[in-house]
Image (tube, helix red, strand yellow):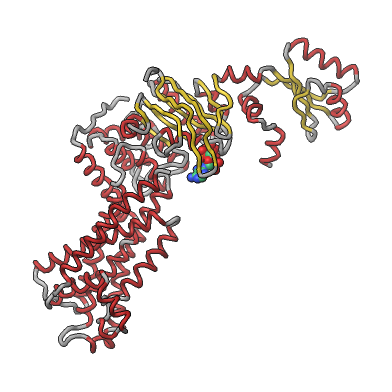
Amino acid sequence: MAAELVFEKKPKWWLSLNDSLLMIKRSTLHIIRNTDQLLGAFFQPVMFLVLFSTVFGGAISKALPAGVTYLNFLMAGIIVQTVAFGSTTTAVSVCNDLQKGIIDRFRSLPMSNLAVLNGHVTSDLFRNTISTSVMLLTGLAIGFRSHANPLHWLYIAGILFLFTFAFSWLAAIIGLFAKSVEAVQWLTFVMIFPLTFASTAFVPAEGMNHILRDFAVNQPITQVVEAVRALILGSPIGNHGWLAVVWCVGMLVVALPLASILFRRKTSQ
Amino acid sequence: MADTDYVIEAKNLVKSYGQNKVLKGINLKVKRGTMVALLGPNGAGKTTTVRILSTLLGFDSGTVHVEGFDLIKEADKVRGVIGLTGQSAAVDELLTGRENLVMMGRLYRLTPASAKARAQELLEDFDLLKAAERPAKTYSGGMRRRLDLAVSLIAVPPVIFLDEPTTGLDPRSRLSMWNIIKKLLADGTTILLTTQYLDEADQLADSIVVIDGGKVIAEGTAAELKSKVGNDRLELSFKNEPAFKQATTLLAKSVVETNDKEYTATVVIKDTDTDIRQTLNALAEAKVHVQSMEIHKPTLDDVFLSLTGKQKTTKKEETK
Ligand SMILES: Nc1ncnc2c1ncn2[C@@H]1O[C@H](COP(=O)(O)OP(=O)(O)OP(=O)(O)O)[C@@H](O)[C@H]1O
Ligand SMILES: [Mg+2]
């Protein structure tokens, strides 16, 4: 053994942070190398954007406030929906890691175990940033216009980051529970699909029946969508801003420790 | 910690999965700088033992010390001194060989420069330099195994667990893996290896622990185990069934194994010279013609089969 080994002599918190950074790098490389998935992250949102705005645009625009085009209304909804579905990747990656031997390798190292989850969740931010940018650019090309100033965009980015984070941690839980990647796929689908459609992401709540409307206007996706939408359209944000933040923080407070406990339990038997 | 000579020391290790008692009190000691081979058939509990010793799996009772550290109370310290190569290759498929090594090196707390230097060294040692910049998913089974082992050596851990490192490798890759392992031993590494191959244990290990059904059924050096089964054997083959039948009745007392499809009978011979002569004389007197014969020295195979109580003949049928 010729090379001399030099070990880091840093405090424990620095080492844990570094573990997470290494895992974020790993998950981000996964996103970049997994070409099929990356293409999905590009084209799926674009397809949704174009389809929804052309198919539903005519019918729904009558129900919108005066001066708001359906494309401008839709943008917030499509972005939030894409972010929500994007969290599936976290669930799949977590499940994949558990199925394969690699998790044993990580666990036999003196590293902090949660770094693996941290990596998957945080790298979602990276992919969502790509997806969202692609959508905004496509939107601009087909007539999307916004009233938001740079500060508003900063708020929008902040809310979306928080939402991505919260949703990805929830998705990590699904990934920990599911027995196979196929199970992850349908589980996340049946959870996310109704949540995004029974919301104001694509249509205003006014046209819904009572029960549906009560659900739709009070659920987290709607709060996030409405907050982002108000910032995009330059309309008053009302309670949606802080409700969106409260929901996201609430989801995080529940999901983070739950995922940690599940992860420990799942990997120690 | 009285016995610091023993790097791995497990006492009365018990583990159940629900009702299924998988380990029923395993005792295991590995001296510094030596290799112990854990030998056993499928389902014997080899992987379970290794997973427990490498902190991946909890256990119900017993005590384990690795490098003097208590496995439960000082799990993190144990992790700092062990390297593990599990039964299924644990490399990141989407990362290249080099990226895998550097990442693991960093997770072992090596500095970036040190991790890179060490990765380069291992890629050279393990003949992976050409494939270093390719994602691991493009590697062949043998390359993946080598990368897997390289990854667990990145921080030169003094203690290494190898769970069936050569299963599924072709003879050449197997040989190169053996050479790597021998070199590790020469460098003073302490190794616990599991295997189903008796020749592997025979070739590499300083001592062998045979387990079956979650219990240690024998232990000792290869020579000691062989002497337990003891004697040389003489395998006689006959031309046809009548001759075979006649011979087996004639030699009934000393016959230990027969095969009525190939008409062979094996007899134990204690005093080589006289026993062989007597056996052949007896057959000659009865005018039974022996087609061919062969003398077998006991192999670990015999040890294993006689200890686990499974007859060679039945095993052959199972695999057919
Ligand atoms: N997660 C689990 N849940 C329930 N039973 C298990 C689990 N893992 C292993 N077992 C059981 O424990 C026993 C020992 O398994 P183990 O994997 O240790 O055997 P092994 O000696 O490594 O076998 P092999 O040579 O096939 O790798 C088997 O009967 C197996 O079915
Ligand atoms: Mg095994």
Q: Residue A81: where, in percent of width, then height? A: 28, 70
Q: Is residue B169 visible?
A: no
Nearest the camera: B305 or B2? B2
- The residue positioned farthest toward the bottom in the image shown: A62
Relative to A115, say whether B232 is above or below: above
User: Residue at image x 22%, y 82%?
Assistant: A70
Nearest the camera: A226 or B112? A226
User: Residue at image x 62%, y 19%?
Assistant: B226
Is A55 left or right of B276, judged from the image as shown? left
Q: Residue B27: where, in percent of width, then height? A: 49, 26
Q: Quadrant of residue B19?
A: top right
Q: Residue B213: where, in percent of width, then height? A: 58, 35
Relative to A105, say whether A260 is above or below: below
Q: Quadrant of residue B265?
A: top right
User: Residue at image x 36%, y 51%?
Assistant: A262
Is A120 left or right of B192, judged from the image as shown? left
- The residue positioned farthest toward the right in the image shown: B286
Q: Residue A230: where, in percent of width, then height? A: 15, 75
